[in-house]
Image: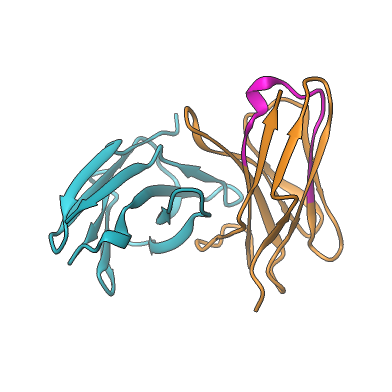
Chain colours: A orange, B cyan
């Protein structure tokens, strides 16, 4: 079974721009979560989608948004990028909401200049 | 509030046993998971405790005590490849939200 895939793997943007990241979960998994990882803050939960509905949201500003499609693929969007948005963005999928085992993708490393 | 505390760094030698503690300050959660992340890699699932007690998976064991609001990950027969960051993760019973600890960087020396 193919693992979680994320595209692109690396991205360089400038302040004020927007960015869209994509995540394809493991086949059969309906829950997709997004995380931001930085050296200073560690791994922080952004949001979770299940069957195209956002079920949970972390404490991030409204510039961070996401969606999930009928095939469970998910995208997250960050608008009006700030320098502090530079981070590794990780996507994880699981069979169901609250499932204890999350399968992580390799991440998208975003650099904002 | 919701917070998890783990030591930031632990160093041990090959073949030894190391314990990484995780303390939390919350209630109403499904369980406690542990993830391993090598530098530049994705976190990978190691273990999950829904109930109090010890769960063993090969060289790794994880323990949870809800009454003591404490858990730990035990790694036996340490190998160099075990050098990585280890995260404890709380799974809340409100929609499955995950809260990650800051991670413990384990360095295994020869």
Position of A103 with respect to B34 (left or right) is: right
* Outermost residue, bottom side: A1
Please tell me which residue is depicted at 66% across the width and 27% down the height of the picture.
A85
Magenta segment includes A45: no
Classify the position of the C terminus of chain A by image quarter.
Answer: top right
Give the residues in magenta. Answer: A75-88
Does the stretch in magenta take in A76?
Answer: yes
- What's the residue at 67%, 74% (across, down)? A2
Q: Residue A50 sits in which quadrant? A: bottom right
Q: Position of residue A68 (x, y in %)?
A: 81, 53
- Looking at this rendering, what residue extends furthest in the front direction? B110
User: Looking at the image, which is closer to me, B60 or A54?
Assistant: B60
- Residue B11's image quarter? top left
Foreground residue, B24 or A83? A83
One can see residue A45 in this view? yes
| One can see residue B52 in this view | no
* Left-right relation of A59 to A8: left
Q: Is residue B68 left or right of residue A19?
A: left
User: As rendered, which of B19 and A50 lies closer to the eye?
Assistant: B19
Residue at 43% x, 53% y is B38
- Give the image location of residue B44, x and y in percent: 47, 60
Percent across and percent down for residue B4 are 37, 37
């Amino acid at each position: 079974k193919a693992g979680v895939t994320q595209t692109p793997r690396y991205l360089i943007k400038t302040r004020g721009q927007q960015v869209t990241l994509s995540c394809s979960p493991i086949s059969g998994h309906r829950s997709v979560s997004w995380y931001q990882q930085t050296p200073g803050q560690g791994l922080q939960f952004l949001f979770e989608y299940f069957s195209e509905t956002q079920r949970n949201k972390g404490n991030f500003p409204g510039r961070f948004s996401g969606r999930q499609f009928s095939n469970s693929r998910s995208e997250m969007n960050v608008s009006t990028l700030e320098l502090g948005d530079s981070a590794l963005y990780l996507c994880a999928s699981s069979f169901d909401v609250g499932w204890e085992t999350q399968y992580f993708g390799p991440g998208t490393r975003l650099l904002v200049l | 509030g919701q917070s998890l505390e783990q030591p930031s760094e632990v160093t041990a030698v090959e073949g030894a046993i190391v314990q990484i503690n995780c303390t939390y300050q919350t209630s109403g959660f499904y369980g406690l998971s542990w993830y391993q992340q090598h530098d530049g890699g994705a976190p990978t699932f190691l273990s999950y405790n829904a109930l109090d007690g010890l769960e063993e998976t090969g060289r790794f064991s994880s323990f949870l005590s809800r009454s003591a609001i404490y858990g730990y990950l035990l790694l036996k027969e340490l190998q160099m490849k075990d050098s990585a960051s280890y995260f404890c993760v709380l799974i809340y019973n409100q929609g499955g939200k995950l809260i990650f600890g800051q991670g413990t960087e384990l360095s295994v020396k020869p």
